[in-house]
Amino acid sequence: MDLERLTQRLEGLRGYLDIPQKETRLKELERRLEDPSLWNDPEAARKVSQEAARLRRTVDTFRSLESDLQGLLELWEELPAEEREELRPELEEAAKKLDELYHQTLLNFPHAEKNAILTIQPGAGGTEACDWAEMLLRMYTRFAERQGFQVEVVDLTPGPEAGIDYAQILVKGENAYGLLSPEAGVHRLVRPSPFDASGRRHTSFAGVEVIPEVDEEVEVVLKPEELRIDVMRASGPGGQGVNTTDSAVRVVHLPTGITVTCQTTRSQIKNKELALKILKARLYELERKKREEELKALRGEVRPIEWGSQIRSYVLDKNYVKDHRTGLMRHDPENVLDGDLMDLIWAGLEWKAGRRQGAEEVEAE
């Protein structure tokens, strides 16, 4: 029966969620929140409060659902068969709560709750690829808006003829990095080209990188002697006030060659602060990868932005989007490109967690 399946699902989630450990951690955080000295550091207090709120939601939802299902089970056994259908609304509500809990288990990895730094670069395909990169930028911006996230443009370089040559955005919101993390990889577009007078079919590629925003307490030391900071005139759209002032800032980390450019505001100081913040995040990610050499052999490895490397194909003339890792296919590419990504993202998180079997190799179009 449905109730038995729901109860089994809840038991299956118990291990993934590790409720006793969460309850222990929650008690520890609540003790800290009762300590008046914590509030002398508003930032530390904010982070403790946020972690406690996240844990409380998970624990309360699990315990409430556990109690509800126990009550429903007792009712089910007492009711005659012909009256059990009356419990259908309660069962459907329990199923929704179980889905929410299951999704939380997919976001149970380091930094999932943090903001995301998302970078898009065109690959093979010339002007077509630049246009495709801009389409992806709009897709992720619309996705963020649908989730109630804030989007801050860090850097944006227009393409030589159309689209963009580079874009980096900061997506702010709870679990922004966790949700966007499976989007990292190569995305492939197939369509009749609007830039081809003959309307021939073209294939374009763009690469997406997603890393978490690094908290201030993460120890990443930026030595002044290892930095080159250049100030320049902002480029691209943004209004006359932006384009005629030396407000753009480029920071080069000399030991690694990592370069971050920020021209999002008219303030040189604010651009410099944001560029250094992004640089810290990139250096942190670099160190993390050094400590975890095995990542090179895992699904998150960096691959060329070209044929054979794609994680997802968007085939517009055949009206479908297919994720090549999970096998999930959609037949409404216009909605996907408008930011309707949640089913693709949950499937990608399942794949990352090893709970979804990989799809067959990508087929030729």
Image (spheres, rainbow, N blue to C red):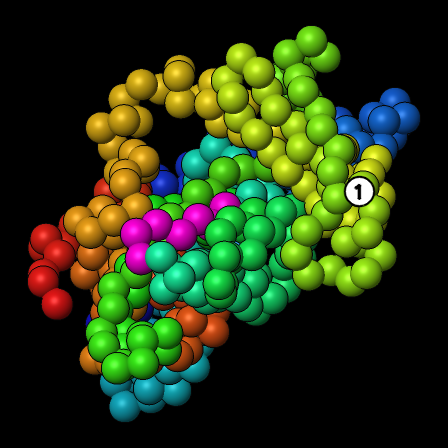
Q: Position of residue 174 (x, y in %)?
A: 60, 50
The quarter of the image holding the N terminus is: bottom left
Which is more toward the observer, 60 or 130? 130
Q: Which residue is mark 1?
A: 247
Q: Is residue 121 magenta?
A: yes
Residue at position x 23%, y 77% in the image: 200
From where the camera sits, is residue 63 visible? Answer: no
Q: Quadrant of residue 26?
A: top right
Query: Quick one: quadrant of the C terminus?
Result: bottom left
- Say which residue appears at 61% left-offset and 28% top-offset: 279
Let me know if residue 338 appears in the view.
yes
Is residue 21 in the magenta section?
no
Question: The residue tagged with tag 1: helix, strand or loop?
Answer: loop
Of residue 215 and residue 200, the one placed in the foreground of this image is 200
Q: Residue at x 60, y 51 (%)?
A: 156
The percent coordinates of residue 217 (x first, y second) are 68, 22
Q: Which span of residues is magenta-colored? A: 119-125
Q: Tell which of 154 and 219 is nearer to you.
A: 154
Q: Amino acid at mark 1?
A: Ser
Q: Position of residue 298 (x, y in %)?
A: 25, 32
**54 relative position to 39: left or right:** left
Around disc 1, counting alpha carbons within 10 Å, would you say few (fewer than 14), some (14 to 19), or many (20 or more)? many
In this rendering, the answer to whether 329 lies above or below 298 is below
Q: Is residue 222 left or right of residue 112?
A: right
Position of 151 relative to 352 (above/below): below
Q: Nearer the viewer, residue 32 or 349?
A: 349
Q: Quadrant of residue 109?
A: top left
Q: Residue furthest bottom?
A: 82
Residue 101 in the image: above or below residue 5 = above
